[in-house]
Amino acid sequence: MSAYPVIAEVTARIVERSVESRSAYVERMRAAAAEGPARGALGCANLAHGFAACGPDDKAHLMGGERRNVAIVSSYNDMLSAHQPFERYPAMLKKAVLQAGGVAQMAGGVPAMCDGITQGRAGMELSLFSRDVVAMSTAIALSHDMFDAALMLGVCDKIVPGMLIGALSFGHLPTVFVPAGPMPSGLPNTEKGRIRQLHAEGKVDRVQLLEAESASYHSAGTCTFYGTANSNQLVLEAMGLHLPGASFVNPGTPLRRALTEHAAKVALECAPVGQIVDERAVVNGVVALLATGGSTNHTMHLVAMAAAAGIVLTWDDFAELSAIVPLLARVYPNGSADINHFQAAGGMPFLIGELIDAGLMHPDVHTVAGYGLGRYRDEPFLDENGALDWRPAARDSRDESVLRPVDTAFSPDGGIRVLDGALGRAVMKVSAVAPEHRVVTAPARIFDDQADFLAAFDRGELFQDLVAVVRFQGPRANGMPELHKLTPALGVLMDRGHRVALVTDGRMSGASGKVPAAIHCTPEAAAGGPLARLRDGDVIRVDAESGRLEVDVDLSQREPYLPELATHGTGRELFAAFRERVGRPDEGASVFSSAPPQVVIA
């Protein structure tokens, strides 16, 4: 089926605006590929360094150049549950690559930090910047000119986007992303959220809260709510960078191991990553995100990932696609189910099949599994001999409270809205926000730090209709931390019957819930944007229905307030150059942007 007209039109506009940058990227990758395996040009001393620690057989293979060498780049550490399973992957992958006729080397590691641990802490101010550090670390791992292909081991938040940005600098190499899968379901996310809110009200103590959190985050694997980590997996599979059906298979299972081993074989024969990530694949990633109410972090990550392949993606593209992509999934915080329930209901094969049949995804794309996204309608399984194979997935959802077909979608449009107006441009994840809460007009309460908001809440000062403005949280100010610690308090205010919204130049990520939150507001306050000119009592209108973000005063008549910002401690001083260089959120919030941030006062 041909693409739905809007899908085709948006894709055509992306292609048109990207002609120059994409052509330059493709030409660079073509030139790199034409040079052949780079290690063939290495001097003898260089090459000897490259295989000095290998065993005799691998050394002979690399010395002779008759076998392809696969780089393994990993985000393993054993503090983070999502990445802990990767400890055993390199040995497994080396053996599988050898059996498939290649050689594999552990090329390098990338940092992996956890937003869940750093919530509300100074370390969170390094989180967004860690994406670009991961990209640079990936490039360093691949820079030795020893490799013919790559396997990327990453899961969470900024790690996967960073690895893809780095891999696309070596876009001539076939590259397969290898997930680890989500932990089994623990305490239901809705119950966890309820206890968090009770704690915010002082009705449960820290011991009870910690018990609930520990029952929710309880084993190796990705957290089970539909935040950025699981959005990463979904988006990459929709873009054809995972094996079909690989995203949400639990760690430690025979199927997970079989998929991991098969990824090694595929890396030796699949298309280059720079060919797979084209304009159609990027649109497929956006559509899958919207159809499932995924993480708002990807309004920045997808823009930055696309730019790494010479593709210019904008928030207008998100808005136009969101208007016609139906919401097919309800996974916490957009519902009560977790990602394991999504998988059990039909998961990615059902989702992709529905979107292809409705003309909402491009089927004519390259993937690591071969040409055509139709391969991703199949589900992986182990046959009676324990061998990995794929079969057509069921065409009916196994649980329509979690995953639905297009003709009975939860909503006719996607989960992300773009808001514009006197306060700048922002995004809102509306898939978890009830329709009656999507338009809020109320006086502003201004805070320059999330701790100040929480202190005011504890003092009982916020029990009224209000729009909480938490500013100086953008990338130039302090690295754009996530502000999830605000959610329980804002939820309490809503439950008391108050009309409440949040406006911030910070982030709320994939875990933003029932509170209407206009986030990633740009231009940010630290760049002199409109939020820096607001005062307590200004009446703000947050309107997700019409896509407006307005205030009842003329801000151009005020001077911006620019406070002294904390920039030292917990490593923050090392990222001064990043804060000075970083681009706008709607341009990917990247330090790799060619242009400095622009300030436009509405």
Image (spheres, grey):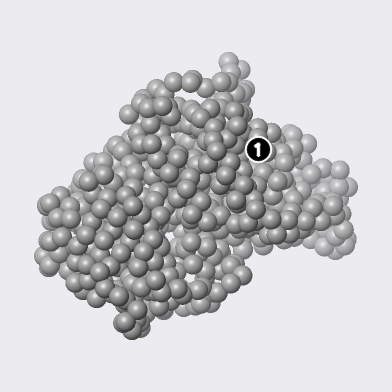
Residue sitting at 82 percent across and 62 percent down? 46
Residue 366 sits in which quadrant? Answer: top right
For the point 70% across and 52% down, which residue is it?
171
Q: Residue placed farthest to the top in the image?
A: 384
Residue 429 % position (x, y): 36, 50
Residue that appears at 79% across and 60% down: 49
Callout 1 environment at 10 Å: few (<14), some (14 to 19), or many (20+)? many
Residue at image position (56%, 58%) is 304
Work out which quarter of the rendered image holds the C terminus and state it: bottom left
96 is higher (above) or lower (below) than 120:
above
Q: For this rendering, which residue is in front, 163 or 289?
A: 289
**Residue 102: image location, x then y, percent:** 77, 40
Label 1, on which residue?
Answer: 365
Report whether residue 449 is seen. Answer: yes
**Circle 1 sits in a helix, a strand or a loop, which is it?**
loop
Return the x and y of residue 74 as percentages of the image width and height: 59, 51
| Horizontal arrangement in the rendering, residue 99 relative to residue 261 (left or right) | right
Q: Amino acid at mark 1?
A: Val
589, 578: nearer the viewer: 589
Image location of residue 421, percent across then percent down: 36, 64
Q: How many marks?
A: 1
Q: Which image quarter: residue 135?
A: bottom right
Q: Is residue 271 above or below residue 453?
A: above
Q: Quadrant of the N terminus?
A: top right
Whether residue 369 is visible to the viewer of this picture, yes or no, is: no
Query: 93 left or right of 317?
Result: right
Pick whichever, 286 or 392, lies toward us: 286
In the image, taking residue 202 as reference, residue 101 lies left or right, namely right
